[in-house]
Amino acid sequence: MARALGLRLIQGVLAAFGASLLVWLMLPLAPGDPAEMILQARRVEEPTAAQIAELRERFGLDQPYWQRYLLWLAGVLQGDFGLSWRTGEPVWDGLMRRLPATLYLVGLSFVISVAWSLALALVAARWVGRWPDRLVLAYTRVLAALPSFVLALLLLQFVVVGLGVGLVLSGGAGATLVFAAAVLGIDRAAGWTQLLRAGLIEHLARGPADVARARGARPRRVLTVYALPAAMLPWLTALGISLGGLIGGAPILETIFTWPGIGAHVLTALSVRDVPVIQAFVLIAALAYVGASLLVDALALLMDPRMRAGAVR
């Protein structure tokens, strides 16, 4: 088991740095000179050629692109994420000031999405083919097709503005955290609900569930004791895969709800092509995905002995 998890960890770390390389290769395709855009972001309306040249030399923008990536990678391996091109402050310090707020949002949204998808899937599987099941299916299909930012704007319009609950400009208010986490969690729960529902229905039709019914077990016990544990493995895998997506999707909702996380910081960095900040965020999101996937792999190996035998082959 330790060998299997070690191999998964190595693969995950390589994937994280592969993601950073992919982002680094795509950024030059964006239009505009980063040095000029950064100066404009600093409210220098018409940067002179000397100012642009000085900034390019200061941040190494006059070096070949591959060389800049290798220098960045060498710094990251030593724990140095460099300086923000826009603000001049250490990238790590700027992100760490804002990361706790993002982690609060992601953590609460993850709890909401897990609880909500579990409850809906159990209801749908308990009354499969009847109106509760049809209602859950219709709900998840609508949510799966509705982008999270649209749901966020609807909530702001009808709940915050219409009913006067919460603030449009939050400044870190607790109600805003609940709203943003609910939108992010409910959005993710749609796909998870469909996956768990399908697994529950499949295992309710298998032998162990039939034997339990023959022995007089009640439908609720058959569902929760015999079908649920067997159907949870694909669901847990989906949770692990999506956790990194929660962090990656948080900046848009943080900006909409003016939550003081890393959202506005990263989106501003994208607008001026502040590469060190963008790269650090991509690496954090990718490592979060790797860590969550590794945790799910460990749970899967513990739950299914057959996977332990196959993982090391």
Image (cartoon, helix red, strand yellow):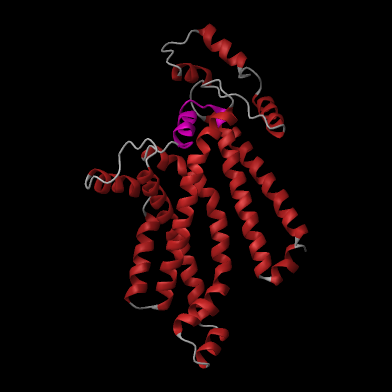
Q: Residue at x 32, y 75 (%)?
A: 131
How many numbered discs, if any?
0
In the depicted view, which residue is nearer to us: 298 or 65? 298
Image quadrant where residue 254 sits: top left
Furthest-left residue in view? 162
For residue 276, say whether it is visible: no
Q: Quadrant of the C terminus?
A: bottom right
Main structural element of the magenta stretch: helix, strand or loop? helix
Q: Position of residue 113 (x, y in %)?
A: 45, 58
Q: Identify whether 153 is placed above or below 226.
A: above
Q: Identify whether 182 is placed above or below 266.
A: below
Magenta span: 261-277
Q: Residue at x 27, y 46 (%)?
A: 165
Q: Position of residue 1 (x, y in %)?
A: 75, 62
- Magenta stretch holds residue 274: yes
Q: Position of residue 117 (x, y in %)?
A: 44, 63
Q: Residue at x 57, y 39 (%)?
A: 282
